[in-house]
Image (cartoon, rainbow, N blue to C red):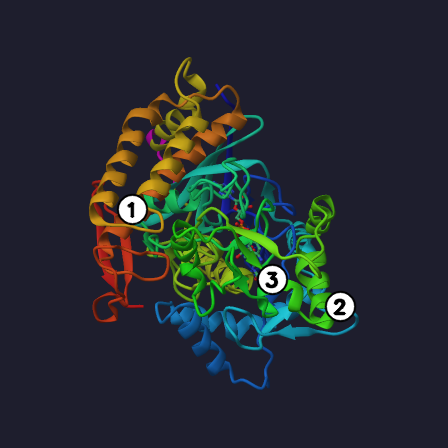
Amino acid sequence: MEHIKEIESDVLIIGGAIAGCSAAIKASQSGAKVTIAEKSALGRCGCAPWGLDHIWWYTPGSEMSLDDVIDAHMERLCKKLGNKGVLATMWRESFERAKDLEKLGVEFKFNGKYHWRTHHHLGVYNSLIYAGRNLTSALANEVLRCNVNVLNRSMITSLIVDGNAVIGAIGFNTRSGEFIVIKSKTTILASGGATRLYPSPTNRLFSTFAPPNDTGDGYSMAFRAGAQLINMEFPMAHPTTKGFRPSSTGGFKNAGAPVIDAYGNPLEAGIDRSETSRLHKKASEEGRYPFYVDPTGISEEKYAEICITSIKNEVPMYLDFLQYKGFDHRRDIVEIEDHEWDLRDGRSGLLIDEDGRTSLEGLFAAGDCTGGVFDAESMGAIVIAWRAGESAAGFARKKVMHTISVNIIEKEKKRIFGPIEQKEGVSWVEVNMGLQKIMREYVGEIRHQAGLERGLENILELKENFVTKLMAKDFHELMRCLEVQSLLDTGEMVIRAALARKESRFSHFRTDYSTTDDENWLKFVVLERQPNGDIKIFKKAP
Ligand SMILES: Cc1cc2nc3c(=O)[nH]c(=O)nc-3n(C[C@H](O)[C@H](O)[C@H](O)COP(=O)(O)OP(=O)(O)OC[C@H]3O[C@@H](n4cnc5c(N)ncnc54)[C@H](O)[C@@H]3O)c2cc1C
């Protein structure tokens, strides 16, 4: 059987992208002994390595007051359903954190100066355009300088709970199969959101907008441990250039380029982006497909700026794509399609406070695995992770290390390595595709009670009949089998939350409750698994 690696740490961080690294740096600077477990590899993992083109950054003394910016985010992006404490903290501390990042070598200036723009979804002048391509590597280099214990290719599969407290975690090395048991005084989840839950428009499992190995592992682990999760009913998508998965049309829309249908009629004017998929579906059924962004009217000056920021900095491979297709955006309109629905950006996930504290003792969370702020994005991840790192280190100073019972370790070991022991059974691909079909058919743009109930039955059936039959021929496939189990849990949470929310809001549209009901539903739907396995679902004021 696989070798066991045992580790003790004051602070364990699960996920080593920008939230994980930010938390590690601050926890280590606060005197804690820190371990990061990353399923992929530090410096190259997560959403940010291919480049970000903007970051929230409030400069003291700006034309618009800090309170007005916070209110604008709350009104326009969260539509009042937002965690105001987290949101305000993100904006308040954005300047300090951005300055820290600049010291680490992240390039915020180009052509020698800062460039600001109004963000197309927020409409306030506090989105800094920058070359965010080295953000992930700059943070990872600092983590290494801080002597953090880094476990690359290490997938964490379960949190260990004692009563209401998280006391460690268990996982395995996805290359060697080494079994990993980590005792920790505090744990910070920074494991990102969930993609591969809904089918990609290309029907390829790994052709996704966000990294395909962000598979809701954090949602699943936290849920199984009994933490509270919110906003799980709101997966959504943005339109991107057809055939080109990463973001690429935002810059054009930002500069005022209209979205039009096949007949040149304006399509998305005045529509919130959480509702665009439904609008596209409806227009498509009316025979108005395909849809386009028309950048041909953008001024030369704006176009040159987009080429530098949204294209050259963020997605340079888009230039190759344009060349291959023979497109010229000064002349040609761009066909668009919605990427697969996913959960991320700090919208859906663990309920946290301003320090990243969750409902479980000793468990903190930051970044895309947390819920409550629509479009918290990278600055939300960094600010809250920073605070979580400091708070977790402080918490660890007052705690003693717990022992993890042999029974728990043996039980999880059996669960993790089950698919490797299996001689015949089903592949993770079949289960993943089956789940995607259920999510598309029953929990898509148009929802209602009977459909959601049928979707839930289907997921529970998949769990019951196929999870124990999952088969892996190596440790890489074993990781995929465990990811699929996280996705099944995530899908179940999406449906349960959608069943609970008896109104329509954002991407959640129910034909049986087709209006937005602020009086009763300007509230988070909270999911909390009880120790006996029952799932408690309740409303909570934001
Ligand atoms: C295409 C795209 C463009 C974007 N553009 C911008 C932009 O311009 N500006 C902006 O501010 N934001 C942007 N964002 C959002 C921003 O990138 C994210 O909000 C941010 O990077 C999230 O960071 P994170 O560390 O929380 O999560 P992630 O980057 O998702 O990282 C999570 C990490 O956890 C690891 N992990 C997952 N499960 C496990 C496990 N079980 N065990 C161990 N490790 C695990 C993953 O491998 C991954 O490395 C964009 C996002 C995308 C997808």
Circle 3: residue type: Asp
**Labels in figure, total:** 3
Residue 41 vertical position relative to residue 188 in the rendered view, above or below: above
Q: Is residue 307 above or below residue 318?
A: below
Residue 353 figure quarter: bottom left
Judged by depth in the image, the label closer to the viewer, 3 or 1, is 3
The residue located at (66%, 60%) in the rendering is 310
Seen in the image, is 137 located left or right of residue 76?
A: right
Image quarter of the C terminus? bottom left
- Mark 1: amino acid: Ile
Q: Amino acid at mark 2?
A: Phe
- What residue is disc 1 on? 495
The answer to whether residue 376 is magenta is: no
Rendered location of residue 321, percent (x, y): 69, 46
State whether label 1 is within 8 Å of ligand 1: no
Q: What secondary structure is the magenta-colored segment mainly?
A: loop
Residue 53's spot in the image, x, y percent? Answer: 64, 62
Residue range of the region highlighted in magenta in the rendering: 403-407
Residue 399 appears in the figure: no
- Of 339 and 128, the residue lying toward us: 339
* Residue sitting at the far right: 111
Residue 335, numbered circle:
none
As drawn, the label of residue 110 is: 2
| Residue bearing mark 3 | 294
Q: CA distance from mark 2 to mark 1?
A: 45 Å
Question: Which comes sooner in the sequence, label 3 or label 2?
Answer: 2
Label 1: few (<14), some (14–19) or many (≥20) C-alpha neighbours in 10 Å = many
